[in-house]
Image (spheres, grey):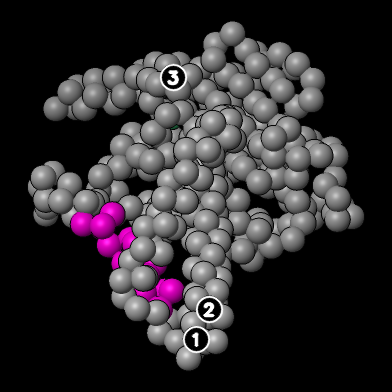
C-alpha cells in the first residue's frame, strides 16, 4: 500500500514539471519593435505596452498592480451557451495605476486580452493588447488613465467575444456596465432554447413588420393639433420607408468602409447610433410633413 502511495506521489511530482513545460514562456523571447510593440516567432505579441509615460491628468502612478488572467475553454463551462472565457470577468483599479497583466492561454488555439478605449495619443488605436498562440504565458504593462471609466476587455479572434471571452475593467468607479459579460450582465441578444428555428424565423419576420407600425405610433404621439387621417398616415410611412431604403442603398459603400477593421461590438454600437439618428430624422420629417398639411388645410376651413 505504502509502495503504491509513494509511486502515486512520485508520478504526480514528476508530471508537474512536465505539465509546466507545455506552457511556452513568451516573456524572455519577445523582440521590442518600438512603440510598445513586442513580438516573438512563437506567436506571442504585446501591443500598447507603456511602462513609464503618464497619461494626461495623472500626476504620478497611484498604485503598482500585477494580475494573472487565465483564458480558455474550461473557464466557460460554468456559463451556459458560452465557449470561451477569461477566469475573471471584472477588474477594478484606481485611476493612474501601473498595471502588469500576466496572460495565460490554456487552450491550443490563439487568445487575446485586448483592452479598448484608452487615450489614442498614448496607446495606438486606443488599445493595449496581449496575444498568445497555444498554451503559453505572456506579460505586458500599461498605465491606466485617470477618471471613472469602464473599459472593454475581450478576445478579438472571430466569435471568441460573442462566445464569452469578454470582461470589463473599471477604472475608479467606472461609468456603467457593458452588456453580455458572462455571469455579470444580461445578453444583448438572448438565446431562446424553447423555440425552434422556423418559429424564430416567423418571429423575426413579425418583428420586421411591426417596425413601421411602431414608427407610426411614435409619430401619432408627437404633439399636433389636427389628427392626421389614417390613409394619409399610411402613405407618409411608405414614403419614409422608401427614403430609408434609398438612404440605406446610398450609405452601403460608406458603411462598409466605416466598419472596416472594427470589432463586432463597435459595429453594433455604430449601427445603433446610426439607427437612432435615422429614426430621429424620420420623425422630424414626418412632423414637418404634418405641419405642411396643417398650413394647407387651415385656410380652406
Ligand atoms: Cu480567443
Q: Secondary structure at mark 2?
A: helix
Residue 243, how many percent across, how many down?
47, 51
Rendered image: mark on residue 263 = none
Query: Of label 2 and label 3, which has the lower sequence position?
Result: 3
Q: Is residue 276 above or below residue 107?
A: below
Residue 296, how many percent across, how many down?
53, 78
Rendered image: mark on residue 296 = 2
Q: Viewer-nearest of labels 1 and 3? A: 1
Which residue is denoted by mark 3 in the rendering? 134
Q: Is residue 213 magenta?
A: yes
Q: Residue at x 50, y 35 (%)?
A: 252
Disc 2 vs disc 1: Cβ atoms closer than 8 Å? yes
Label 2 Cα crowd, 10 Å radius (few <14 / some 14-19 / many 20+): few
Which residue is denoted by mark 1 in the rendering? 300
User: What segment carries the magenta color?
Assistant: 206-220
Q: Main secondary structure of the magenta part?
A: helix
Q: How many marks?
A: 3
Residue 192, how many percent across, how many down?
19, 53
Residue 90 seen from this side: no
Residue ranking furthest to the top:
41
Q: Give me the C-alpha separation between circle 2 and circle 1.
A: 7 Å
Q: Quadrant of ligand 1?
A: top left
Q: Residue at x 73, y 48 (%)?
A: 144
Q: Is residue 76 above or below residue 17?
A: below
Determine which quarter of the picture holds residue 21: top left
Residue 121 seen from this side: yes
Q: Secondary structure at mark 1?
A: helix
Label 1 Cα crowd, 10 Å radius (few <14 / some 14-19 / many 20+): few
Name the residue nearer the viewer: 283 or 238.
Answer: 238
Amino acid at each position: 500500500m505504502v509502495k503504491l502511495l509513494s509511486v502515486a506521489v512520485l508520478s504526480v511530482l514528476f508530471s508537474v514539471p512536465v505539465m509546466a513545460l507545455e506552457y511556452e514562456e513568451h516573456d524572455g523571447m519577445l523582440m521590442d519593435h518600438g512603440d510598445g510593440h513586442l513580438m516573438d516567432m512563437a506567436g506571442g505579441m504585446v501591443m500598447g505596452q507603456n511602462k513609464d509615460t503618464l497619461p494626461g491628468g495623472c500626476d504620478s502612478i497611484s498604485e503598482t498592480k500585477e494580475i494573472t488572467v487565465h483564458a480558455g475553454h474550461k473557464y466557460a463551462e460554468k456559463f451556459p451557451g458560452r465557449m470561451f472565457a477569461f477566469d475573471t470577468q471584472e477588474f477594478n483599479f484606481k485611476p493612474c495605476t501601473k498595471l502588469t497583466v500576466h496572460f495565460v492561454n490554456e487552450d491550443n488555439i490563439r487568445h487575446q486580452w485586448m483592452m479598448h478605449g484608452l487615450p489614442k495619443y498614448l496607446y495606438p488605436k486606443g488599445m493595449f493588447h496581449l496575444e498568445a498562440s497555444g498554451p503559453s504565458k505572456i506579460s505586458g504593462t500599461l498605465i491606466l488613465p485617470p477618471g471613472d471609466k469602464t473599459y472593454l476587455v475581450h478576445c478579438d479572434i472571430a466569435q471568441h467575444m460573442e462566445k464569452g471571452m469578454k470582461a470589463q475593467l473599471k477604472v475608479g468607479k467606472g461609468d456603467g456596465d457593458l452588456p453580455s459579460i458572462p455571469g455579470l450582465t444580461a445578453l444583448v441578444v438572448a438565446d431562446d432554447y424553447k423555440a425552434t428555428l422556423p418559429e424564430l424565423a416567423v418571429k423575426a419576420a413579425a418583428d420586421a413588420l411591426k417596425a413601421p407600425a411602431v414608427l407610426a405610433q411614435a409619430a401619432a404621439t408627437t404633439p399636433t393639433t389636427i389628427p392626421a387621417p389614417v390613409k394619409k398616415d399610411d402613405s407618409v410611412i411608405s414614403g419614409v420607408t422608401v427614403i430609408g431604403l434609398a438612404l440605406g442603398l446610398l450609405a452601403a459603400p460608406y458603411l462598409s468602409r466605416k466598419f472596416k477593421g472594427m470589432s463586432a461590438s463597435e459595429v453594433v454600437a455604430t449601427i445603433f447610433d446610426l439607427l437612432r439618428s435615422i429614426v430621429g430624422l424620420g420623425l422630424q420629417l414626418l412632423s414637418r410633413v404634418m405641419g405642411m398639411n396643417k398650413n394647407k388645410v387651415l385656410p380652406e376651413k
